[in-house]
Amino acid sequence: MIPYSCQSISEDDIAAVTRVLRSDFLTQGPEVPAFEAAVASYCGVRYATAVSNGTAALHLACLAMGLGPGDRLWTSAISFAASANCARYCGAEVDFVDIDPATGNLSINALEQKLARAEKEGCLPRIVVPVHLAGLSCDMEAIRALADRYGFFVLEDASHALGATYLDQPVGCCRWSHAAVFSFHAVKMITTGEGGMVVTNDEAIHAKCARLRTHGITRDASEMHDVPHGSWYYEQVELGWNYRLTDIQAALGTSQMKRLPDFLAARRRLAARYDELLSELPVQLPARTKTSESSWHLYVIRVDFDAPEMTQRAFYDSLRADGIGVQLHYIPIPMHPYYRRLGFRMEDYPEAMKYYRQAVSLPLHQRLTDEAQDLVVEKVARLLRR
Ligand SMILES: *Cc1c(COP(=O)(O)O)cnc(C)c1O
């Protein structure tokens, strides 16, 4: 099977991990701060907190923005469930914004209208989570302008977008947001197996994330309630979690960061090659925008399955039977039974629904060869030309 995405592990990556296994620290040693510094420096952002996965990063960022019962978090109707689940962990309500059919990212128009309505009804969100779907940045200038007008926090779900740019700035620089999160799951831009990070320029958000990552415990005397009893002393000042990343993982992450420019170059070249090879077929190619250069985490085409004599299901089944690991990113979050039980209805998200009936992620990753890509295109073309 040619997977839609997969990791690339080099001998240097393996050596980095082995070095930690032979060292004094498997966790809470020097590797985590080094990995945080590498990502922060790449993104041009002040602070970074590495955590056990991207979902934990979203959870901590929400808590650091004060999200709790009675509050609301809004995100895109098309994303991985974690973009919304983070609010539920905090006891907050979730709501969804329909997507822009051109990019698959949350629609600025829909967001604007929903905010105007929410203001009248007194139910504005505390946090809006724009998701840079497939690695293409949302319109962050517009979102930030709305945030300033309506007073919400902007938390970027940049799980797909490490290495992408927006207005020539790296995604994660947080110039238009209060914080951004990355995921280092095996299929993402770089990997630590499982892993995630919160980046921010806000010292308070950073301090809170760092504390909540390890039980709400502080060793910083300035954060303590009592005068330290001695050199052993630490205080748990609030309820946190164990969301730490290990040094083993962080060393892999730092090594992968060195390879990120190569990963991006490979993905960009393959994406341009797909654009060309698919140009004659009846498919909508992934959007390109003037403001963002995608990281190309995913290559999502859209097929009007109502038109040709080929159903969405038959298309997927046929490609998978031929060893092409196509995937659908994503099932609209409000469509999941858990969210349906909370009262969400797909009629309220017509563009997300339409997207769901058309989207196909073709294999795209740094180990995909031109020959394998040709095979993907050949199989797709044969099905669509029928
Ligand atoms: C992968 C992903 C996450 C969650 O990351 P994990 O590291 O798997 O917890 C969140 N949001 C989006 C959009 C993702 O793709």
Image: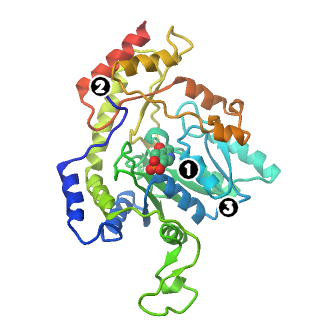
Q: Earlier in the sequence, mark 1 or mark 3?
A: 3
SS of the residue at dot 1?
Answer: helix
Where does residue 60 sit, x and y in percent of width and height?
Answer: 54, 61
Q: Which mark is residue 68?
A: 3
Which residue is disc 2 drawn over? Answer: 373
Which residue shows up at 53% across the image and 93% down it?
A: 227
Figure quadrant of residue 316? top left
Label 2 beta carbon less than 8 Å to ligand 1: no
Q: Is residue 167 left or right of residue 42?
A: right
* Amino acid type, callout 2: Gln
Q: In this orientation, which residue lies closer to the viewer: 90 or 355?
A: 90
Cα–Cα gap, marks 1 and 3: 27 Å
Quadrant where the N terminus sits is top left
At label 2, counting other C-alpha atoms closer than 10 Å, the crowd grade (few under 14, some 14-19, many 20 or more) is some
Residue at image mark 1: 141
Q: Residue at x 52, y 85 (%)?
A: 222
